[in-house]
Image (tube, rainbow, N blue to C red):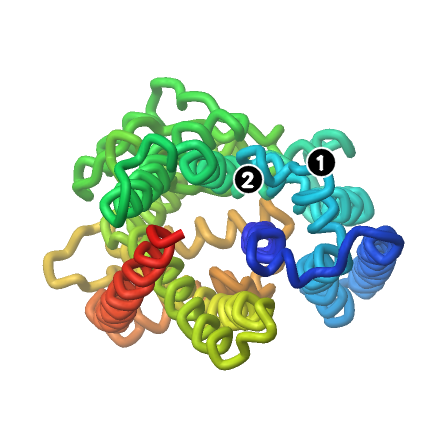
Amino acid sequence: MHVVVLAAFVVAFVLAGRPVLDEMMPAGWPAVAATVFYLLGAIVLGWLARQLTLRALDRRWQGGRGLSPWRGRWPAVLMILSRCWLILGLAGVLAAGYGRWVMQDLRLGLLPLVGDLAAVAPFVVALMGVWILDYPCHRRVRLLLGRQSGSDTPVPAWTLSQYLAYNIRHQLLFIVVPVGLIVLLTDALHLYGRSIMPQGLAGAYVLLGMGAAAAVGVFLIAPAIIVRVWQTRSLPDGPVRRGLQQMARRMGFGFRDIRLWLSGGVIANAAVMGLWGPLRYILISDALVDSMDQESIEAVFAHEAGHVISHHLPYMAAFAISTAVLCGAVGNLLAMAAPWAQWAGPTAWVALLATAWAGGFGWISRRFERQSDVIAAWAGDYREDGRIEPESAAVFARALQQVAMLNGMPTTQRNWRHGSIAGRVGYLRRLVVVGGTRREIDRVVRRIKIGLLCALACAAIILAVEVTVEMMEWTEL
C-alpha cells in the first residue's frame, strides 16, 4: 500500500502543478460528477473484494484447507483493480476540474503544501472507505487463526478504530510525513525564497541546492519522526535487548535505538529505518517478542541487520531517484515532440514510472530480501568462507514460518516485495543441501548494485543538463 499512496501523491503533484494545470478542465459540474463517481467506484470495488474474500475464507476453512491461500484469485484481482482505480481515478478527478478548483479558484496553490494536500484529499477519503470495507476480513482472519491454533487464549484482533488508526499511521502517514515535509520546504523556498536569493543563475542554483539539502535532511531525520508517528517505545533492558545489541556489535553496524513496535499483539514483524547510524532505528513488534524464543528473535533481527550491512536502503533510494529522472527525461522528450499538449510529458512520466516500479522495484526488492535471508542464516555461525550451516538455516527458516503463522499468512502466499515464505525457506534448504555459501546471492546483488549505480550516473548527467537549461530559462523571466 505504501507504493499506492506514494503514486497517488505523485499523480496529485504532477497534475495539480503548472503548466499541466492550465491544460485541465475548469471547475464545474464535471468535477463534482467525477469525484462522486471516483468515490462510488472505490466503494463498489472494495465491497466486492470484501465479499469474495470472506466467501473464500469460509469455503477454504470448511474444506479443511485452513487459511492457505486465504484471499483467492478473484479477490486478489479485485484488490489490484481497486488500487489501480485509487490512482488512475484520482488523475481523472483532477483532470475534470477539481485540480483547478483547488489550486486556482480557492487559491490554495499559493500556500505551501496546503494545495497539494487538498488535491490528494479525494484519494484519502476513498482509501479510508476501502479500509472500512476491508475490516471484516481482518476480523475473520483473526478468528480463523485462533481456531487454527487450537489455543484457548483468544487471538488478539483490532477494533474498527484501531484498525483504521493502524492503517493511517503505518500506510498513510509513513508516506505523507516525509513527503509532506519535503513539499512544504520546497514550496516555501519557491514561493518566498526568490526575493532573497542572489540575482541571475547563481541565485537559481542556490535555490536548487537549498531544496536538495532540505530533501536530504528530511530523509535523514524521517526515522526519528516515524517511530513517534507509529506507536513504539524503547525496548526495555533484558535478555532480548542485550542479545540483540551483542549481535549488532558482532555484525558491525550501529543504530540509535531498538524500539518495541506496539500493535496490541496483532503484528509479528520487524523493520529497520534510517540510512545513518545515529538516526537508525530497529523495530521489533510486541507479538514477535511475546511469542518467539530468543534464538528466533535474533534470527529475525539478523535478517534486518542484513539489510543494513548490505546497504540495501541507499540502493533502493538510488533506484527511486534514477527511475524518476530517467522516466522524466523520456516524458520531456515527448513533451517537446508534442508541444500542443502540455499534459503529454507528465502523463508519460507517471506511466513510465509506474511501469518501472511495478516491474523493477519488486524484482530488486526480492533479491535484496533473499540476500538478507542468507545473511540471517549465515549469522548463526559466522563462517569465514560464507558457508551456510544446516542448524543456522533451520533456525531462521523456523523463525520465518513462525512469523507467517502469527500473522495468519499462508506460507505459499506471494508477496510483491518479499516473495512467499515457502519460496524463501525452500531456497535456504536447497542452499544447505548443495553446501552453498553467500557467494551466489552476493554475486547477483553485486550486479544489481552496479546496474543501479550506472543508472544513477546517467540520471545525474541528465539532471545536470536539464537543471542548467531550466535555470537559464528561469533567470530570463
Q: Is residue 403 left or right of residue 30?
A: left
Q: Is residue 88 left or right of residue 285?
A: right
Residue at 48% in and 66% down: 357
Say if 292 sits above or below 308 in the image. above
Query: Badge 1 is on which residue?
Result: 164
* Front residue of 245 and 40: 40
Q: Characterize the local packing of mark 2: few (<14), some (14-19) or many (20 or more) Cα atoms within 10 angstroms.
A: some
> Could you tell me residue 242's position as x and y percent?
28, 26
> Could you tell me residue 14's position as x and y percent?
56, 56
* Residue furthest out toward the bottom: 337
Query: Badge 2 is on which residue?
Result: 176
Residue at 31% in and 73% down: 433
**Sequence order check: which comes first, mark 2 or mark 1?**
1
Disc 2 to disc 1, C-alpha distance: 16 Å
Residue at 57% in and 61% down: 411
> Could you tell me residue 112's position as x and y percent?
53, 34
Instruction: Give the residue type that dot 1 points to.
Output: Leu
